[in-house]
Amino acid sequence: MVSQQIFANGKEAQYGRVFRHENGLIFIYLKDDTSINLQQAQKLVEDVRTLDDSGQARLLVVQGNNNDLSFEAQRFLGTVKGLTHLALVVHSRFQADVAKIFVSLLNLLNSSYEMKVFHLEADAEVWLRGE
């Protein structure tokens, strides 16, 4: 059985769907009840680089329900190169509170990219496009 299904502008992966929008942004929709460990975080970054190898990727990540990110995955994602901006779309106050902790971790790790948390996908997209 194939774990990833490739389609025209992205792929369906174990963690969710990742694709490059016609506006150049990389969208990641995380599946519900998904825990992301270090290996899955590395695969996610590899998938993003397949879609945008410019070193200037702008990501819009939409959380599913009941997602979990291991500390090792957080540390890896906080130090990865090749991104300039990451917009995280959350659906609940709890997700927003957890995301704020991740933003603090990025600051401690001197991350090379900027991250913001949003409740609306449209607002996240506007920020990523610099409008």
Image (cartoon, rainbow, N blue to C red):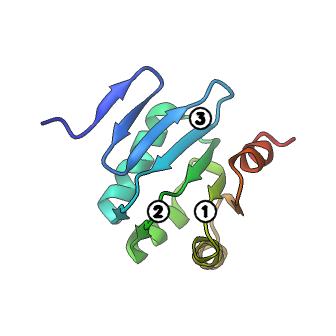
- The residue to which callout 3 is attached is 54
Amino acid type at circle 1 is: His
Residue in the image at 34% along x and 27% along y: 6
Separation of marks 1 and 2 at Cα, in angstroms = 8 Å
Q: Nearer the viewer, residue 76 or 127?
A: 127
Q: Is residue 73 above or below residue 16?
A: below
Task: Find numbered disc 2 in the image and state the secondary structure of the residue it sits on.
Answer: loop
Q: Earlier in the sequence, mark 1 or mark 2?
A: 2
The answer to whether 6 appears left or right of 69 in the picture is left
The answer to whether 126 appears left or right of 87 in the picture is right
User: Which quadrant: the N terminus?
Assistant: top left
Residue at the extreme top: 8
- The residue to which callout 1 is attached is 91
Name the quadrant containing residue 129: top right
Amino acid type at circle 3 is: Ser
Amino acid type at circle 2 is: Asn
Q: Earlier in the sequence, mark 3 or mark 1?
A: 3
Q: Is residue 115 above or below residue 109?
A: above
Q: Residues within 10 Å of mark 3 (few under 14, many from 20)?
A: few
Q: Residues within 10 Å of mark 2 (few under 14, many from 20)?
A: some
Q: Position of residue 92 (x, y in %)?
A: 61, 69
Residue in the image at 55% along x and 31% along y: 20
Separation of marks 3 and 2 at Cα, in angstroms = 31 Å
Name the quadrant containing residue 32: bottom left
Task: In the rendered structure, find residue 65 and report the number of the disc placed on it.
Answer: 2
Tag 1 near tag 2, CB within 8 Å = yes
Camera-side mark, 3 or 2: 2
The answer to whether 61 appears left or right of 67 in the picture is right
User: Which quadrant: the C terminus?
Assistant: top right
Q: Position of residue 111 (x, y in %)?
A: 62, 66
Q: Position of residue 98 (x, y in %)?
A: 57, 77
